[in-house]
């Protein structure tokens, strides 16, 4: 009796589906399945949506989700439901620059319109820096920032610090510090490091060296905690990547380890760049390494941000070979690689004495509005 009711419900569901599609043709069924019910068709939509939401929130790459969408029309239709797209994970939205297309753009826009803050941030970064649609990109990042998305808050802070997309006079240091403080409060490591340097240098905020140092130590601690959480237990058992080095020896350390935590004397692997930053780096690498003639990329490999006007980024006053979009990127790149490539601090001091009128390098006006490279070279070294 129960089976008869079940088969009747399945039949009714199929008939309703055909009526909604305006189809009067009889469905073609394989002989071996003739007379048997389709259990998938009997599943209610809300249950399928729940499963797809779980899949989208745990997908390890975009292919994990797109392979489900192409399975059948029902999954394709329900997979593009706003509820499913709003749950999409960061890894599912990690579109590669070499695979960028109009369909990828539409998919990210669908996710952003569904209220997915990660999609708003990713598409905002792509539009602002890659597609040069500044207004739309900034609006999408602002939409994510309103929802307390820490990377979006920090990216908007960098835009305010540099006046990106506008002129040098469009810089708003106070707004940058406020956005950076909000992102730091949410635990964003680069924002903590940036805020620490701003407080130490008095950049956009009243100078407070002790408080700035506290933020830098907190950034280092969070960085170490993030690496410990992401490192397999087998790797933790070997102490090759986590060692103690005396401070003086640590300054001249050259090896496979990355001395990111000079405060604690720890060598840890370089952090994995976020998907949006990786997209920017790959996008400009495919196009020759330069965004436009005369414009440069941030020299920190994990950033990928390009200049939006000439001489927007600060330049190292010791060697002049590298430039950075933020103090956080400079501090990381200094400890990752530039410390062993740049001119020694002693030579930098001698050149500073010889060129005293241009002590800040890059034509800065002395108020942090150009390239205050002196503070950039010496921080955390």
Image (cartoon, rainbow, N blue to C red):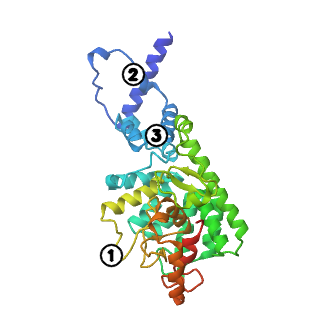
Residue nearest the observer in this picture, 12 or 237: 237
Residue 25: percent from left, percent from top: 28, 29
N-term mark: 2 or 1: 2
Residue 317: percent from left, percent from top: 49, 77
Q: Quadrant of the C terminus?
A: bottom right
Q: Is residue 336 left or right of residue 130?
A: right
- Label 2 – label 1 distance at C-alpha: 60 Å
Q: Is residue 68 left or right of residue 274?
A: left
What residue is disc 2 on? Answer: 38
N-term mark: 3 or 2: 2
Crowd band around label 1 with a 10 angstrom C-alpha radius: few (<14), some (14–19), many (20+):
few
Q: Mark 2 or 1, which is nearer the eye?
A: 1
What residue is disc 3 on? Answer: 59
- Label 3 – label 2 distance at C-alpha: 27 Å
Q: Residue at x 43, y 62 (%)?
A: 304
Q: Residue at x 40, y 32 (%)?
A: 17
Residue nearest the observer in this picture, 228 or 284: 228
What residue is disc 1 on? Answer: 293
Q: Residue furthest top?
A: 1
Crowd band around label 3 with a 10 angstrom C-alpha radius: few (<14), some (14–19), many (20+):
some
N-term mark: 3 or 1: 3
Residue 46 visible in the current orientation: yes
Q: Mark 3 or 1, which is nearer the eye?
A: 1
Helix, strand or loop status at disc 1: loop
Q: Is residue 349 left or right of residue 66?
A: right
Q: Is residue 266 left or right of residue 206?
A: left
Residue nearest the observer in this picture, 259 or 16: 259
Residue 36: percent from left, percent from top: 37, 15
Q: Residue at x 70, y 61 (%)?
A: 214
Q: Residue at x 58, y 80 (%)?
A: 368
């Amino acid at each position: 009796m129960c089976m008869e009711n079940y088969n009747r419900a399945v039949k009714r569901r199929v008939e309703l589906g055909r009526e909604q599609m305006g189809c009067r043709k009889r469905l073609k069924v394989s002989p071996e399945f003739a007379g048997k019910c389709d259990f998938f068709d009997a599943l209610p939509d809300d249950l399928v949506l729940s499963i797809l939401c779980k899949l989208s929130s745990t997908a390890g790459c975009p292919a994990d989700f797109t392979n489900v969408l192409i399975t059948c029309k029902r999954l394709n239709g329900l997979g593009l439901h706003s509820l499913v797209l709003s749950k999409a994970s960061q890894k599912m939205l990690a579109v590669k620059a070499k695979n960028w297309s109009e369909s990828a753009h539409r998919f990210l826009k669908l996710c952003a319109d569904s209220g997915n803050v990660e999609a708003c941030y990713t598409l905002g970064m792509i539009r602002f820096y890659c597609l040069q649609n500044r207004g739309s990109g900034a609006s999408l990042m602002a939409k994510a920032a309103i929802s307390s998305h820490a990377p979006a808050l920090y990216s908007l802070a960098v835009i305010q610090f540099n006046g990106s997309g506008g002129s040098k006079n469009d810089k708003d240091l106070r707004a940058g510090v406020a956005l950076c403080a909000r992102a730091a409060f949410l635990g964003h490591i680069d924002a903590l490091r940036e805020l620490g340097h701003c407080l130490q240098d008095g950049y956009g905020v009243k100078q407070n060296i002790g408080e700035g140092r506290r933020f830098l130590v907190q950034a280092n601690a969070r960085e170490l905690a993030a690496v410990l959480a992401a490192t397999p237990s087998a790797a933790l058992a070997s102490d090759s990547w986590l060692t103690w080095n005396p401070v003086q020896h640590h300054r001249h350390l050259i090896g496979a380890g990355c001395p990111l935590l000079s405060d604690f004397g720890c060598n840890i692997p370089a952090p994995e760049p976020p998907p949006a930053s990786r997209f920017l780096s790959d996008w400009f690498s495919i196009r020759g390494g330069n965004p436009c003639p005369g414009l440069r990329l941030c020299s920190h490999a994990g950033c990928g941000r390009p200049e939006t006007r000439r001489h927007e980024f600060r330049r190292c006053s010791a060697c002049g070979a590298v430039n950075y979009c933020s103090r956080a990127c400079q501090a990381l790149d200094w400890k990752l690689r530039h410390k062993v490539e740049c001119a020694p601090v002693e030579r930098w001091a001698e050149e500073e004495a010889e060129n005293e009128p241009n002590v800040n390098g890059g034509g800065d006006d002395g108020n942090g509005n150009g390239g205050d490279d002196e503070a950039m070279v010496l921080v955390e070294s």
